[in-house]
Image (tube, helix red, strand yellow):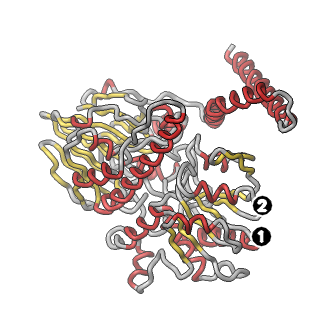
């Protein structure tokens, strides 16, 4: 009985874990790596697709499901188990991902052909995504299902997304029995629309996410404890909209099409119905994403059994919780382009949530440089993404090959994260009546996952470990299972910041080389901004000096 961590091991995206039992191969999630994770591990499957017997999906987000069409394309013939809501969301999300793969391959192929190289094949196509849906089988919450000899499963509400689950697996091999629990993405407390996460009583081994393992969410003003009530979130959003509209600007919200967009619509309905922006009249809201529009229809059709009590009270009164008169949904490209020619202020919600692709990049291009506008982030921004650069205070960003100044207001909507923070993770893990034999910490970056594993071991007295990518462990040989080493709390933030700086410098190295080469060719022609080049050189020299100081300080401390 073995477990292998193929994805989201000391990474935030690309969740994929394999369990071998009784000659069967099980996958828990088969996600697409994104941002720096993609650059590190690539997108190819690290195992034979036709060897996999069963797949269990925790939820529909692409970083947990995005390689399912590739799995099927490469020969998978087994069964994929998920809740019905997850299956419905996968149907639209995987097709959308296939479309993106096709478009990116077409763009790369045009570029390659111009350079005299071969064209690029998409990772998979829309047709591959559609074909994958025939392998899905739906499960309901709280029901134990017999899958195969020695394999049983139960899905529990994880409170992260419509249909999201923590998964219990009961495994038997010979006389040995083990129970594994996969947390999936554990939801935050008191999120709009969906229920809080369920808690599980027992497990031998836990595979647990740690996205916010070293952080406690910033709470909106007036929030109490772990909970941020809807009216407080709505008022924070209203304040942002009101001051932006007073300046004559737009509120641009990069948003994940599935889950976050619908939560924002819920809050905007509260803002509008309760007149929380008293100094402005109408609040035009545009959802500019075909996927978001489709997902909103799925949410509207999956209310019973998935939504929280507050939402169901509205439904029972005949109120749609995510629709309102000033909402306009956009799918047509021409209508999307027309948004950037509007003179009146509006709220534009568009994907992708990390600003890496999709129509949001066009809206950022037309609004980032405008001081009167606001870019509002409402979700996690992975290292190496455009969204992270903007949120971290970049003065300039490059979009579609053009440098854009960032002059607008940039802010975050607090308390709306779909992930539990450290307090929520600890609450989930300590809900087990008997401590697990081991907690494997995944879905956290290179600093967070090992640190959280150390934190769990030191403070909760549960043996924990953050596996490395591709690491394989024997679940029947408990004595061989590693335990997290101690990590100095004070060092973690500095390590993370320096690593991210290194990743950003590495990413920009090619651009810098190109600039240097072009300046050498151009000589001293008047169109060159030589002052800016000198400032850049001085900044690089200062950085080199700072790094040399840090190295000397570290060496002296070590001595």
* Drawn side of residue 309 relative to residue 221, left or right: left
Please give the name of the residue rendered at 45% of the width and 57% of the height, measured from the top-left corner. Answer: 187
Return the x and y of residue 367 as percentages of the image width and height: 69, 60
Which residue is painted at 36% across and 36% down in the image? 438
Q: Residues within 10 Å of mark 2 (few under 14, many from 20)?
A: some
Residue 268 drawn above or below residue 447: below
Q: How many marks?
A: 2
Give left or right: position of 428 versus 343: left
Q: Is residue 458 left or right of residue 348?
A: left
Q: Nearer the viewer, residue 169 or 95?
A: 95
Q: Name the residue: 22% across, 56% down.
A: 137
User: Image point 53% across, 47% down: which residue?
Assistant: 212
- When the figure is inspected, residue 479 is found, relative to residue 416, above or below; the finding is above
Residue annotated with mark 2: 371
First along the sequence among labels 2 and 1: 1
Foreground pick, 192 / 394: 394
User: Residue under circle 1?
Assistant: 247
Tell whether label 1 touches label 2 (CB within 8 Å). yes
| In this picture, residue 158 sits left or right of residue 137 | right
Residue 511: percent from left, percent from top: 67, 33
| CA–CA distance in space, label 2 to label 1 | 9 Å
Task: Report the front residue among 253 and 117.
Answer: 117
Label drawn at residue 355: none
In which quarter of the view is residue 219 placed?
bottom right
Provide the secondary structure element on which disc 1 rests: helix
Helix, strand or loop at mark 2: loop
Which of the 4 quarters of the picture holds residue 552?
Answer: top right
| Quadrant in which residue 318 is drawn | bottom left
Residue furthest bottom in the image? 317
């Amino acid at each position: 009985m073995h477990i292998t961590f193929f994805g989201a091991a000391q990474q935030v995206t690309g969740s994929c874990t394999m369990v071998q039992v009784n000659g069967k191969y099980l996958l828990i999630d088969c996600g697409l790596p994104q941002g720096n994770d993609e650059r590190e591990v690539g997108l190819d499957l690290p195992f034979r697709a036709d060897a996999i017997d069963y797949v269990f999906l925790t939820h529909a987000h692409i970083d947990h499901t995005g390689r399912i069409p590739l799995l099927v394309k490469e020969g998978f013939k087994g069964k994929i188990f998920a809740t019905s809501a997850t299956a419905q969301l996968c149907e639209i999300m995987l097709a959308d991902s296939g479309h993106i793969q096709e478009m990116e391959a077409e763009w790369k192929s045009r570029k390659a052909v111009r350079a005299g190289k071969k064209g690029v094949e998409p990772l998979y196509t829309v047709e591959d995504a559609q074909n994958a849906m025939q392998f899905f089988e739906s499960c309901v919450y709280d029901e134990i299902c017999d899958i195969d000899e020695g394999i049983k499963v139960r899905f529990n509400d994880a409170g992260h997304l419509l249909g999201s689950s923590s998964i219990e697996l009961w495994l038997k091999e010979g006389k040995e029995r083990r129970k594994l629990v996969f947390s999936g993405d554990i939801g935050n407390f008191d999120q709009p629309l969906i229920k809080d996460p369920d808690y599980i009583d027992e497990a031998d081994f836990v595979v647990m996410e740690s996205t916010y393992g070293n952080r406690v969410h910033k709470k909106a003003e007036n929030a109490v404890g772990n909970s941020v009530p809807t009216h407080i979130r709505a008022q924070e959003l209203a304040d942002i909209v009101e001051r932006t509209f007073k300046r004559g600007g737009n509120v641009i919200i990069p948003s994940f099409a599935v889950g976050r967009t619908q939560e924002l619509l819920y809050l905007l309905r509260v803002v509008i119905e309760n007149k929380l922006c008293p100094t402005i009249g109408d609040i035009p809201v545009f959802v500019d994403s075909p996927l978001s529009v489709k997902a909103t229809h799925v949410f509207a059709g999956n209310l019973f059994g998935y939504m929280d009590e507050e939402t169901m009270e509205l439904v029972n009164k005949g109120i749609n919780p995510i629709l309102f008169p000033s909402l306009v949904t956009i799918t047509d490209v021409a209508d999307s382009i027309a948004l950037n020619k509007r003179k009146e202020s509006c709220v534009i919600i568009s994907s992708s949530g990390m600003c890496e692709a999709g129509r949001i990049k066009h809206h950022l291009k037309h609004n980032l440089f405008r001081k009167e506008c606001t870019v509002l982030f409402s979700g996690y921004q992975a290292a190496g993404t455009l969204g992270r650069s903007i949120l971290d205070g970049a003065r300039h960003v490059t979009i579609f090959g053009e440098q854009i100044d960032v002059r607008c207001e940039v802010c975050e909507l607090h308390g709306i994260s779909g992930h539990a923070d450290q307090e929520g993770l600890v609450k989930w893990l300590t809900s087990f009546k008997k401590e697990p034999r081991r907690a494997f910490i995944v879905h956290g970056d290179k600093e967070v996952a090992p640190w959280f594993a150390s934190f769990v071991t030191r403070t909760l007295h549960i043996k924990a470990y953050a596996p490395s990518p591709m690491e394989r462990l024997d679940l029947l040989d408990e004595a061989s299972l590693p335990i997290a080493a101690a990590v100095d709390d004070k060092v973690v933030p500095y390590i993370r910041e320096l690593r991210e700086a290194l990743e950003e410098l590495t990413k920009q190295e090619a651009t810098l080389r190109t600039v240097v080469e072009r300046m050498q060719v151009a000589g001293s022609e008047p169109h060159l901004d030589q002052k800016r080049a000198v400032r850049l050189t001085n900044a690089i020299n200062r950085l080199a000096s700072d790094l040399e100081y840090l190295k000397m300080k570290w060496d002296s401390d070590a001595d």
